[in-house]
Image (cartoon, helix red, strand yellow):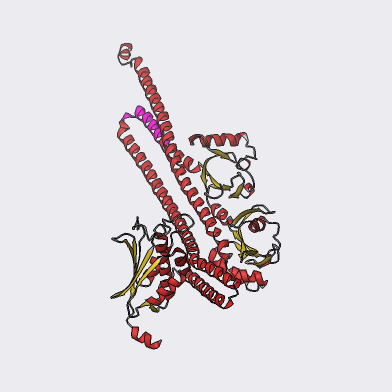
Amino acid sequence: MSKDSSSVKIPPWQPAAISWRVRIALAVLLIFAVVVISVTNRLLTDRFTDTTRSRAELRIALYGGNLLAELRQNAIVPQLLGRDPTLIDALESADYSLSTQRLISFVEEIGAASLMLLDMDGRTVAATDRNRIGAGHRTEAYFVDAIRSNATIFSVILQETGGYRFFYSRRIQNGGATVGVIAVEVDLRKFERAWAGISDAVIVADSNGEILLATEPLWRGKTEAEALENQTPQSAIERAIQATADWTALPPDAYLRGEAVMRLESRVNFRGWRMVSYTTYASVRERVNGVLALEVMGFAILLALAFYFTSRRTAGRAAIFQRESAELRALNVALQREIAERKRVQQTLAVAEQTLEQSSKLAALGEMSAAVSHELNQPLAAMKTYLAGARLLLMRNRPDESLSAFGRIDDLIERMSAITRQLKSYARKGQETFTPVNMADALASSLSMMEPQLRQRQVQIVRILPDDAVYSLGDRMRIEQVLVNLLRNALDATKSERNPMVEIILTAGETVTLTVRDNGPGIEDLDALFEPFYTTKQPGDGVGLGLAISSGIVSDLGGRLTARNGQAGGALFEMQLPIYDGTKETKAAE
């Protein structure tokens, strides 16, 4: 019996060998799991951190662009309102009954926070906020600096309740004498309200590092270092939890309330301002930890399967099915996360498109403001010449002749008012009533307006006109506006010529064609000629809007404005307008 028992006894070395192999396999699996998790952690952290940083950079670029657009939009307002004749007359006559209502009508179009009209004593005589009327501002920076300067002044005013107010101001002059100050308050606090709806913290600091705008109200007036100072000490448990949560993040740029954050800085192209955003690593931690949790789960399943295979080799097929099921579930979770991520990206892109559309509207408003300044330069230059002539006539005791000059000045003022009305309604096409326009009379009126420049430059004007009157159906004021722009460009093009000459040809066929040819050097870039803000003039001589506005006017009238270089040199502009067939009826009516 003992002999039989000894014959079936298991060798003592077999269990030890199996245990050794299992231990080696488990050790290899654990080492492999640690390596895979470490590599995955590093790669995913870098990838998701770069994605988060890219989105934060896009946001701070959009925020900076919106802030700069708001500042530039309001910068031109004091210059325009400083030339408003109604406000100037009110300051001269001390009659402010209609001034407040006029400022209210302006603020609705401009979008500023408020407007104030101050007299020479710094007293508010008109304001969009009627509660401010009568208040004194004699010691305020936006009044003192504006009185002393010829330019538009930007002021940052600290409030007693905390925070800042931002003003653009400019003095109002009449005949060389200062009569008051116009102040425009810019509403930058609306950006704080908009930024408060996101997870990032945003600040805007001036060139001295003082925080002017912030999503945290307590940060205003402090430096960045003071704002980021952690005032609440953390307990040991909180520090341990924080260390565990931060183990998947890259080295932080800064700490905000003891939490590691990503810091991004962007310069705002305005007085040395800069914008800083702080983005938490929460999204990075969530995504990395989610993937790592899946990997840990997978390795745990592998370990369970390893133990299962060692104990029951007969259940291998069932274990394979379980592993495949676990992999499919992990793939399903990953796909769901990817779908959710794409939805978030689409929402972010939608917000970015809305922001860019608003920036385009603000840019269009800036172009219209620049257009007003451009179109008023010519009448202002003519008025200056007529005033000088009238002064000489009065000094020579010739008042009757000076009255003629004043009459021309009155016509120019009426023209400036008409140009302002036209530029205000520039975008509302198809709402004007056209009338027959005698092109020869429109040309004569334009040349009369350009008479001071023509006399000063001694430019030879050659006019080739048909014997019969030529009529076009349109708006005479706008047609004269285009003619003045074409003549002005021709005069500028012949500055370097010893014998400047401008040739004007009016013909009538299927269309009314008016050609302006000069003997200047010609046009270098014909493709970009009619684009806004394209100009070959020296800084201060023009903003590059004349031809762009002229092309738009001619298109509105149903015509076409083209340009080319002449065969014998010089530039040639050709304006084609619809011809008016009812010439006889028009003459009979006249």
Left or right relative to 72: residue 469: left
Quarter assignment of residue 496 = bottom left
Q: Is residue 403 above or below residue 24?
A: below
Which residue is drawn at the image coordinates 34% and 78% (left, top)? 470
Instruction: Give the magenta-colored segment's residue range.
Output: 296-313
Foreground residue among 483 and 203 = 483
Q: Is residue 194 left or right of residue 502?
A: right
Position in image of residue 45 (x %, y %): 44, 37
Residue 431 shows up from this direction = no
Q: Residue at x 57, y 39 (%)?
A: 255
Q: Residue furthest bottom?
A: 588
- Residue at the location (58% across, 58% down)? 187
Q: Confirm whether the magenta stretch covers residue 458.
A: no
* x and y, in percent, of residue 184 in the image: 60, 61
Q: Relative to 399, does residue 39 appear above or below in the rendering? A: above
Q: Magenta stretch: dominant SS?
A: helix
